[in-house]
Amino acid sequence: MADESEFRRYLSLTLALAAREFPGSYRGNWTGALAAFAVPIAMLATYSLVFSRLIPVGVGADRGQAGYVLFLFAGLIVWNLFADVAVRAPSMFRGAAHYVRRPRFPLSVIVLAPCLASFYRSLPWLGVYLLAHVVLGQSLDWVLLVSILVLLSTMLWTIGIALVLAVVGLLIRDASELAAPAVTLLFFLSPVLYPAARLAELDPRLVDFNPMANAIWLMREVVIERSLPDVAHVVPFAVATTACLALGMLAFRGVRRSLPDLV
């Protein structure tokens, strides 16, 4: 019973802290909820203007310019979930020193809550994407539900990476300043702006050893191709996610007892 009570406390605390970060969950009015959808709608409108009028780009004659906008937007849904957390991760423990020094506070929540909040933020982006499909005259089907599983899997991989980066941020004070440039570099080495196959043609290792490339590939298979993810993409991403979670947990356990002194 004690373990069950601790788990409920851990879960409720995680949900509460995640809700504080998610617009519309903590403001108590429609402004926050509208903002959660207004941002992706504004971004989709901007991409449509830029990539259909100012800088016409295509990913195939069968899709055209509007197809590229949806192609790009699908990749950004996954990418933003990861990047929002990765940039902040090295400073998470240092920025939450008041929580770290509280007795019996579950310290892993400091990392887990922002990852969950980022997952929450990805859902309005996915909703706007699906709405755009309907507006363009395309139908919705059950396969699209798998996209939520892709986002959940991306969140798990992000948790592992965030734990590692948060620990690194404790040991290397300048890590937080390097996070943003590193994430930007990874952005251009991930198939957000272009198909993953084009990156694989350059060097297959850029896809094989980049979990974000597989996550983006999986999302596009589901929401664009309307097919279940290929096992050839699912397995590498599942292995990478499991490895990142294990590494993150090991890194966290290694510094958990000394956290109050390190912050």
Image (tube, helix red, strand yellow):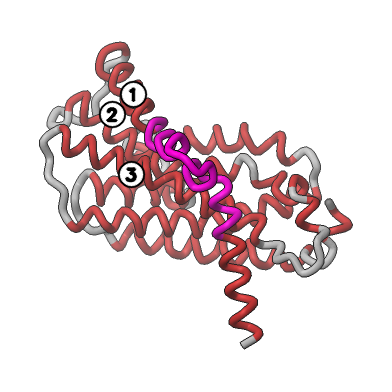
Residue interval drawn in magenta: 15-39
Front-lying residue, 27 or 16: 27
The first of marks 1 and 2 along the sequence is 1
Front label number (3 vs 2): 3
> Residue at the spot x=28%, y=39% of the render?
129
The first of marks 3 and 2 along the sequence is 2
In the rendered image, residue 153 lying in the magenta stretch gets the answer no
Front-lying residue, 94 or 9: 9
Q: Answer with left or right where residue 102 lies relative to residue 23.
A: right
Front-lying residue, 228 or 14: 14
The quadrant the N terminus occupies is bottom right
> Residue at the spot x=37%, y=55% of the render?
150
Q: Would you say the magenta stretch is mainly helix, strand or loop?
A: helix
Which residue in the structure is indicated by mark 3?
126
| C-alpha distance separating marks 1 and 2 | 6 Å
For residue 23, the mark is: none
Q: Amino acid at mark 3?
A: Leu
The first of marks 3 and 1 along the sequence is 1
For residue 69, the mark is: 2
Label 2 residue SS:
helix
Q: Position of residue 198 (x, y in %)?
A: 33, 37
**Disc 1, disc 2: CB below 8 Å?**
yes
> Residue at the spot x=49%, y=47% of the render?
25
